[in-house]
Image (cartoon, rainbow, N blue to C red):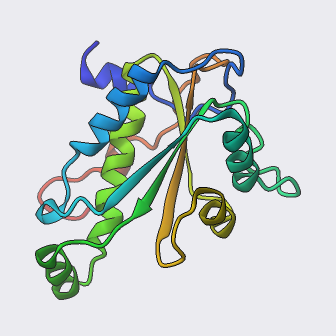
């Protein structure tokens, strides 16, 4: 499968086969893809927490869902959660971020998260990035220090739904050449 085909197949999966475990070697390859992702000044400002213990995974899923709002109610179906915790950037990335008024760690974590989702798709798995979760509950459940930020929770598993057509803006709406619009 070529890269554009992989990107076209990747979608935010919100229904998982809860009876099918994800093989540890697939999780290891997904984590390796994230670990190798690029970062500003090679800061690698991340820590990945793989949650695959069924009881703990269900508690993490509870912390990721909001029943009143109907948010993330599907997360208990997924057998694996990968949380990305923000770590400090190195000196050069930190100075560059201050000079340019950009938080490079969040950009870097976004790149790593994309690597996770694309690697999962390449392994025949579905994924969904979650930014909505109870961060303090996540910290408590996973012994994450109060000084750390949990940026994303990415759920992974075998999809229990088919491929949906992508709804994206037309190319001419989002791309211009040599000047804005």
From what the image shows, is residue 175 above or below residue 179? above
Q: Residue sitting at 47 percent across and 40 percent down?
A: 168
Which quarter of the image is occupied by the N terminus? top left
From what the image shows, is residue 134 above or below residue 55? below
Q: Which quarter of the figure has residue 162?
A: top right
From what the image shows, is residue 51 above or below residue 179? above
Residue 15, position in %: x, y? Answer: 69, 27
Residue 38, position in %: x, y? Answer: 19, 50
Q: Which quarter of the figure has residue 63?
A: bottom right
The residue most toward the right is 68
Q: Residue sitting at 68 percent across and 18 percent down?
A: 17
Residue 32, position in %: x, y? Answer: 28, 35
Which quarter of the image is occupied by the C terminus? bottom left
- Front in this rendered view, residue 3 or 62: 62
From what the image shows, is residue 81 above or below residue 28? below
The residue most toward the top is 1
Q: Which quarter of the figure has residue 5?
A: top left
- Front in this rendered view, residue 51 or 114: 51
Number of marks in the rendered image: 0
Residue 57, position in %: x, y? Answer: 66, 41
Q: Tell whether 119 sits left or right of 40.
A: right
């Amino acid at each position: 499968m070529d890269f554009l085909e992989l990107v076209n197949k990747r979608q935010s999966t919100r229904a998982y086969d809860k009876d099918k475990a994800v093989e540890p070697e697939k999780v290891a390859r997904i984590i390796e893809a994230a670990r190798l992702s690029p970062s500003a000044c090679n800061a690698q400002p991340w820590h990945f927490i793989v949650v695959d213990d069924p009881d703990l995974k269900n508690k993490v899923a509870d912390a990721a869902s909001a029943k009143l709002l109907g948010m993330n109610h599907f997360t208990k179906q997924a057998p694996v959660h990968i949380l990305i915790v923000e770590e400090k950037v190195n000196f050069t990335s930190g100075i560059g971020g201050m000079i340019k008024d950009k938080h490079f760690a969040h950009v870097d974590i976004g790149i790593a998260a994309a690597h996770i989702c694309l690697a999962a798709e390449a392994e025949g798995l579905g994924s969904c990035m979650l930014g909505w979760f109870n961060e303090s509950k996540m910290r408590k459940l996973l012994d994450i220090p109060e000084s750390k930020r949990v940026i994303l929770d990415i759920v992974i598993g075998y999809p229990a739904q088919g491929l949906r057509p992508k709804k994206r803006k037309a190319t001419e709406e989002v791309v211009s050449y040599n000047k804005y619009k």
